[in-house]
Image (tube, rainbow, N blue to C red):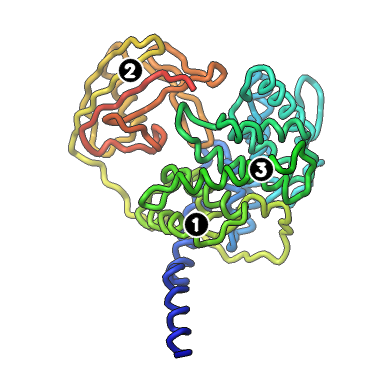
Amino acid sequence: MITLVIVSVLLALAAGKPCASDHEALLLSLNKQLLRSVDTKDTLPNPSVHIALRLSKNHNLAKESEYLNRLKAEFHDDIEKSLRNSELVVGRLALYILALKSSCHDLESVHLTHNEIKESLLIHLKKEMEEEKQNIAFGHRPKTNYYQYSLGILALCVSSVRVNTHVSQKLIHAVEHRQIKHGESLCVDSHAMAGMALQCLKDEGTAVKNTAELDRALATIKQRLLDSKRADGHMGNEFSTGLAVQALMAMGSQMEECGSAMEALRADVKKGTYHNPMAVSQVLPALHQRTYLQLKSQECRNEDDTLTVDADSASEVLPSHGQVSLQVEVIKSNGASSMFSIHVPTGSSLFEALKLLQDKQTGFTFSTEDSLWGPFLSVVNEEQARQTDRRYWQLSSDGNSLTEGIKDYKIDSAQNITIKNTGY
């Protein structure tokens, strides 16, 4: 009888987690994939990539140090340039601070210069958060969005900087009143970031206006994340599940609550869903069962230094000789619609397809701006969709919203692409 009980327990445990060697091999492969991406010099270094590498179990300390130096030079300069151009920087600045924190860097030794005033990153972030809070008070939403607002609170909290109670209260209020959304849909990644930010405040014992309200907000976020789970285990979609799992773990969820989501992430990694470094950087910590909150206690001592980068073993994708038909509809903010048709090589990215369309047909033009996820459409047919106006170009294929950016989404079959100037 005792033997039967032991066997039953072992079988239950085995069913709850993957084979350890298989999981470790998967983690190592993803870790190497992300490390390989740091050698790309034609784009700005990404602080989220550095954070994920630092939260991993295996390290290549020389490459991580080199990447950190690039962040302190190139990414730092880009933030200062954005400030000179009066652009919004809260999210990028918060990630930059977290990246420095992940390497145990002295945050007080790094300064931003703006309007001839030199101040530490943390002081500048506090000022930015005060401006965001004021915008919520008078405009009922942050100048950026609640994802970046939450990221700002998290960066301050993890860095042991007191967060103004009015700043934290605005986020708690937004959770309670369902203001964290994308259009009419629940915004899973923003809820995940809000959950980690508020959990950090709770863990640190940071003063808030009402402790009971904080607890209710955390319980609400947790339930909304769990309710967002699809039949296949994803929370929201493939690209929000990593952050959702991190948030649930940070908020004290047991692995049973995250099990199907973790399995979905592992399945995605195996089939190559995550090739964008930003996407990998959010999934890798979750698979390591690590969260951004653990940067608070990062020690950077006695670290493994065995991670090496092999030559990319992925087989080279040969150019396709086939062509597929693409219909592109552009819908401007006033509802005016334009239709375009073109044949593009099978496997082209949407970015490549749009460039081909621009080169071959009059009447279609576009330009992009860069982000940590890659380029995104900013101007189409001479009409701009700006974040400051709460607008963006929504992309869909055959009526289904795209979850990937224009450089990541591949045209593998004939389809109708809709590009719509949308408010949020």
Q: Position of residue 207 (x, y in %)?
A: 80, 41
Residue under pointer 2: 330
Q: Residues within 10 Å of mark 1 (few under 14, many from 20)?
A: many
In the picture shown, does residue 130 fall above or below 270? above
Q: Residues within 10 Å of mark 3 (few under 14, many from 20)?
A: many
Task: Report the amino acid beneath label 3.
Answer: Ala
Relative to residue 49, is residue 104 drawn left or right?
Answer: right
Q: Nearer the viewer, residue 1 or 83?
A: 1
Residue under pointer 3: 197
Q: Position of residue 92 (x, y in %)?
A: 62, 34
- The image quadrant of residue 70 is top right
Residue at 28% from the left image edge and 36% from the top image edge: 411
Q: Nearer the viewer, residue 317 or 55?
A: 55
Query: Regarding mark 3 in the picture, which secondary structure is present there?
Result: helix
Observer-side mark, 2 or 1, equals 1
C-alpha distance separating marks 2 and 1? 40 Å
Q: Is there a contact, CB below 8 Å, between mark 1 and mark 3?
A: no
User: Which comes before the other along the chain, label 1 or label 3?
Assistant: 3
C-alpha distance separating marks 1 and 3? 19 Å
Residue under pointer 1: 258
User: Which comes before the other along the chain, label 2 or label 3?
Assistant: 3
Residue at 36% from the left image edge and 55% from the top image edge: 314
Residue at 46% from the left image edge and 21% from the top image edge: 378
Task: Report the amino acid beneath label 1.
Answer: Cys
In the picture shown, does residue 144 fall above or below 268? above
Task: Report the amino acid beneath label 2.
Answer: Val
